[in-house]
Image (tube, grey):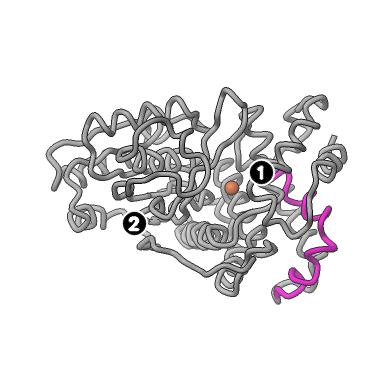
Amino acid sequence: MLSAFRLPTRTTITPGALSKLVTEIRELGVERPFLVFDQGLSETRWPPIVRDALSESCDEIQEFSDVDPNPRVRKVDRAGELARQFDADGVVGIGGGSVLDTAKIVSMLARNPGSCKDYEGKNLFANKPIPFIAIPTTCGTGSEVTWVAVVSDSESRRKISIKGDGMYPSLALVDADLIQTLPRSLISYTGLDALTHAIEAFVSRRSNPISDALATRAITLIMNHLEPCVNDPNDASHRSEMMKASTLAGIAFGNADVGAVHCLSESIGGLFDHPHGLLNAQLLVPVMRYQHDMVRKKLDGISEWASSDKMLDQIEQLISRLNVPPLQSLAIPVESFGEIASLAERNNSNASDPRNMAASDYRCILDGLH
Ligand SMILES: [Fe+2]
């Protein structure tokens, strides 16, 4: 299952990277940008800064700021339709995973007809998406360097993935200054999502030596810098290391895929709309303990930890110190466990997991947490 490593996205990771937007938008030849962000960000200083940068070379900008957490098909389609009507020739997304995934799909829908649902799967669109510039404002999504976008389908109450070679962002501007305005709980949850990306990529059946190098580096950075970053988001060095880690983890899972933690969290998120990062933070250790025998050897190879047992203990303690509420606090009805387990088994990433996970395995993990 080994696959070749790739990253077609031109990626700049440095504090202040946002200032490059003015020249980058010119170089891409974008004249009619479609700007995507959400209400949470509209209260910060970032949208006016992006607007000003775009205005330097673009006469008209179309904005879409109506992005919900766990974006839904209908709203993403509406954004796509607006981009078509505006005749957008580029998309700029600034935000967390929901915003970047929405913007990524809009860049595809701008040149392809119908609903995003029509493109569930891989490479199902005929026309090349318009250029997409991704500017993350959380330290977790990784969407700025992957070809996939996830959207919630209200009808089937599940999350669908849309991916394709042309859906990699043209450009990622990863600027640690942008997480300064992020609430501390979101730094925790998104940082733990990044940790999940790195660990799942590392133990994945699809991992390769390059994704392994990125994943292990990301794990070390997150274990060393997430907690201090949460405690003091004004500390530039911790912020910067977390932002770097998030993108490295994104590149790793963009190549190696994720596994059982995401299979479960996406199933629960699709049914009950709970935040993605929170669910991963709650599920990471229980899933890793469940499949420890399958991944022990590989995890033991990470030199920073004396053993994978110690590593798991440290991750568990970190999650506890970050005050992540347990899964029980979400009161997920036990009657839905069967459906969650079966959705997790059918998730595309299930095949990448190091252990053959059947619905009964997922059910066993859920029962253990009840
Ligand atoms: Fe994730």
How far from the left and from the top, in percent, is residue 351?
Answer: 69, 54
Q: Which contiguous range is marked in magenta? A: 280-302
Residue at 58%, 54% in the rendered image: 194
> Is 297 in front, or is 107?
107
- Tell me: residue 198, above or below residue 126: below
- The image quarter containing residue 46 is top left
Under 8 Å from ligand 1: the CB of mark 1?
A: no
Q: Is residue 321 magenta?
A: no
Q: CA distance from mark 1 to mark 2?
A: 28 Å
The numbered dot on residue 347 is 1
- The image quarter containing residue 312 is bottom right
Residue type, label 2: Leu
Question: What residue did someone put label 2 on?
Answer: 171
How far from the left and from the top, in percent, is residue 49?
Answer: 26, 43
Q: Main secondary structure of the magenta part?
A: helix
Labelled pair 1, 2 in contact (Cβ < 8 Å) = no
261 left or right of 338?
Answer: left
> Is 179 in front, or is 6?
6
1 or 2: tag closer to the N-terminus = 2
Residue at 45%, 59% in the rendered image: 236
> Is 242 in front, or is 266?
266
